[in-house]
Amino acid sequence: HTKNNGRNGYNFFQPSMNTLAQSQLQLNNDLWQALDNQELRLFYQPKYCAPSGPILGFEALLRWQHPTRGLLAPDIFLPIAEKTGMIVNIGNWVIDEACRQLHMWHLQGHPHWSVAVNLSAVQFEQSGLVETVQAALAKHQIPAELLTLEVTETTAMRDPEESVRILTELTRMGVKASIDDFGTGYSSLLYLKRLPASELKIDRAFVNELQAHSEDATIVSAIVALAQSLNLKVVAEGVETADQQAFLTGLGCNTLQGYLLGKPLPPERISELPNFVDAADALAQL
Ligand code: C2E
Ligand code: MG
Ligand code: MG
Ligand code: MG
């Protein structure tokens, strides 16, 4: 809506809204070019086995190197791509590119690493997803169990019955499923139990507030306990301080992600990360 009903009955433009709409339209046009022009890229954020353990793998996070606006975060352009359906094309590219990168790492002496890819709701519910995933695994010779698909709790619970069906089909191939941003949605525990996921990721909103608000500590403890009782791995995202890390590992949450351990980086910079080479990698090289 770019028009508004004025006090005296006239329709007039609200300049700020108009500018916003124009800028969204322009971004949408640019986005169609971005794929062809190879302006989309994946950054990779490490998942560590805590504390100070090896890198377990990486989460692929989408970035757009826009020709004039600079490096754009997904929150700026993914909502538009979801609306237009372009997210399916973009998402297919992400799956292929993450598998290609993982294969490169395997060749470079990191055969244990896994990669996680985020799926949008539209992409998750799109019928070609299984074929896309299968094709990427085969093309890049990736063992299925080294690919994780992250779906937010909100997406998974939109139509829980349907989510059980889709995730069953996907995990039958051997890929892993992870429930992202857990705690922010409204999970039916009944369906959570039935979802063939292997991992819960605690939303970083709870992790962020661990010191400030004791309710968040209670929620995080409850999520970890829930995950453990459902036999799910639990991952904490957004770990920024040593205190947060200590609290989480104290609860038995041993897979950590966050700026404290490593920010998302372009692939050419991941060798800067701590424990870049671990003992298992070194052994595998012999
Ligand atoms: P997410 O999957 O929950 O990813 C975590 C977000 O938190 C990432 O933001 C990451 O950069 C950020 N983060 C990680 N550690 C910290 C920390 O310690 N502190 C703070 N403040 N932030 C941290 P990013 O990369 O901007 O991505 C935002 C969201 O966009 C993602 O949330 C995911 O839902 C979506 N997304 C990213 N890449 C893709 C993609 O390829 N496809 C789809 N469909 N969605 C994507
Ligand atoms: Mg994620
Ligand atoms: Mg998340
Ligand atoms: Mg998120």
Image (spheres, helix red, strand yellow):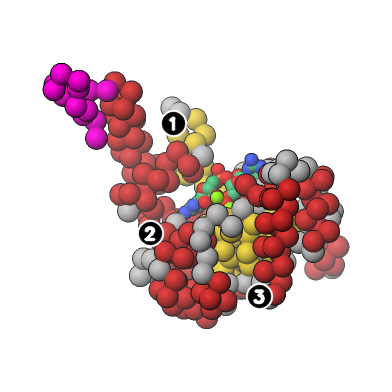
Instruction: Please name which of the two marks, 1 or 3, marks the residue nearer to the observer.
Output: 3
* Residue 36: x %, y % from top left: 38, 46
Looking at the image, which is closer to me, 128 or 35?
128
The amino acid type, in three-letter code, at marker 3 is: Leu
Mark 1 secondary-structure assignment:
loop
In the rendered structure, the answer to whether residue 226 lies left or right of residue 28 reads: right
* Residue 212: x %, y % from top left: 73, 41
Instruction: Please name which of the two marks, 2 or 3, marks the residue nearer to the observer.
Output: 3
Looking at the image, which is closer to me, 216 or 144?
216
Sequence-first tag of 1 and 3: 1
> Residue sitting at 30 percent across and 35 percent down?
25
Q: CA distance from mark 1 to mark 3?
A: 46 Å
Looking at the image, which is closer to me, 183 or 89?
183
Q: Which residues are magenta?
A: 1-14
Mark 2 secondary-structure assignment:
helix
**Residue sitting at the far top:** 8
| Contact check, label 1 and label 3, Cβ < 8 Å | no
> Ligand 1 near label 1 (Cβ, under 8 Å)?
no
In the rendered structure, the answer to whether residue 135 lies left or right of residue 29 reads: right
Placement of the C terminus among the 4 image quadrants: bottom right
Residue holding disc 3: 230
Judge whether 232 appears above or below 98 on screen.
below
Q: CA distance from mark 2 to mark 3?
A: 27 Å
Sequence-first tag of 2 and 3: 2
Sequence-first tag of 1 and 2: 1
The amino acid type, in three-letter code, at marker 2 is: Val
In the rendered structure, the answer to whether residue 241 lies left or right of residue 19 reads: right
> Residue sitting at 66 percent across and 75 percent down?
230
Residue holding disc 1: 67
The amino acid type, in three-letter code, at marker 1 is: Pro
**Label number found at residue 122:** 2
Density class for disc 3 (Cα within 10 Å; few <14, some 14-19, many ≥20) is some
